[in-house]
Image (cartoon, helix red, strand yellow):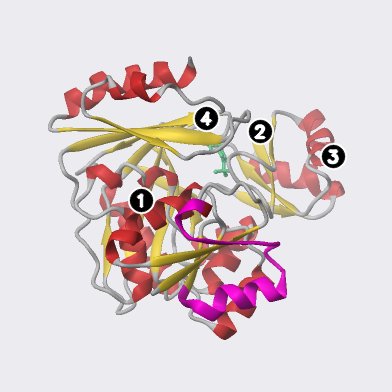
Amino acid sequence: MIVGVLGAGQLARMLALAGRPLGLDFAFLSPDPDSCAAALGRHICADFDDEAALARLAADAAVVTYEFENAPLAGARRLGERVTLLPPAPALAAAQDRLEEKRLFRALGVETPTFVPVDDPARLADAAGRTGYPAVLKTRRMGYDGKGQAIVRDEADLEPAWTRLGGAPSILEAFVPYEREVSIVAVRARDGRTAFYPLCENTHRDGILRLSVARPDDPMEAAAQAGARRLLEALDYVGVLALEFFQVGGRLLANEFAPRVHNSGHWTIEGAECSQFENHLRAIMGWPLGATDPIGWAAMVNFIGTLPAAAEVLALPHVHFHDYGKAPRPGRKLGHATVRADSAEDVARIVPELLRLASS
Ligand code: AMP
């Protein structure tokens, strides 16, 4: 059976690496001829809104999924008319628009930072009156990895930030002095069964995830799961979803969700009984979910812009290296390493070594 994937980057590649042992084959649609998933299936090299290419992707696929939330909605909806598209299109629509996403959180009783929609620069000062300073201006669309956002420290920053972001419809959001960023990766099956991986503690650099540490039995886990469950049920979701929060005191404020497998879940490949990639496939195929239990302790470090030599990474104990096969470019995720060990102390000892390799 063939799984069609919109996108052919590292998430698509890791989906295929998890799916091939289950007897699944893959077809990927992406416009980049050098897509790193291409070696693992059939690559349809075309734009995401290319009608003929979408028809080819749908023709052979048992189900179609996507690896990034900025897949054009119209194309995804047309695909959904021909073939089962999972996660469902409304999840994609909500995740593509920061305003709709945050309104959905609020409607579900999931707390968020204070935010105000801004379509007109003349409204910026008013909006800042409600958020206070500092604040973060974020474009409603096409924001990821810190792109499409600017910090606003005082009134003088408002207009330049608006111009820098291209004058696009945006939200102004209160800057949250958070203690930590956490995410919960969840999976929901076609029959509604739901499972959660342990909460993850995430550290970003320049808006890009650098380090994720799995925290089994974290005190905030139940609150994070409750928020994710409401989202999964409201969207009648099928597949893996990640929900990211800022923690302030004992409160979690939802920042965003990803309707797909997520970078903060890469550690599950070695660190959980069934990885997020396999579970996403099990869910969309209508198969039983695998156990999300952690195997010991784990953390993951991203390699961004440059990739250390495999031999250097693999010289560290308990470490697993993933090279996505992508050409180096500043700010590009080229690979990651997971450390999985039987004690949290062992993991904590090795993480600084990995971070050192990641920044050398
Ligand atoms: P995003 O693209 O919304 O995930 O933002 C990328 C990163 O910017 C987040 O992971 C945070 O580290 C930071 N960030 C975004 N929004 C806020 C906020 N309202 N307050 C503080 N930091 C933020």
User: Residue lying furthest left in this view?
Assistant: 342
Q: Position of residue 333 (x, y in %)?
A: 52, 36
Kind of residue indicated by mark 1: Ile
Circle number at residue 133: 2
Where does the magenta region start and end? 39-63
Circle number at residue 304: 4
Q: Residues within 10 Å of mark 4 (few under 14, many from 20)?
A: many
Question: Alpha-carbon distance for marks 1 and 2?
Answer: 29 Å
Of mark 2 and mark 4, the one earlier in the sequence is 2
Magenta stretch holds residue 62 = yes
Quarter of the displayed picture in which ligand 1 can be seen: top right
User: Which residue does the numbered mark 3 point to in the structure image?
Assistant: 163
Kind of residue indicated by mark 2: Tyr
Say which residue appears at 72% left-offset and 69% top-offset: 50
Give the SS element for disc 4. Answer: strand
Magenta stretch holds residue 213 = no
Label 4 beta carbon less than 8 Å to ligand 1: no
User: Which residue does the numbered mark 1 point to in the structure image?
Assistant: 184
Of mark 4 and mark 1, the one earlier in the sequence is 1
Q: Position of residue 214 (x, y in %)?
A: 28, 39
Label 1 beta carbon less than 8 Å to ligand 1: no
Q: Residues within 10 Å of mark 3 (few under 14, many from 20)?
A: few
Question: Alpha-carbon distance for marks 2 and 4?
Answer: 31 Å
In-image side of 4 versus 194 (left or right):
right
The number of callouts visible is 4
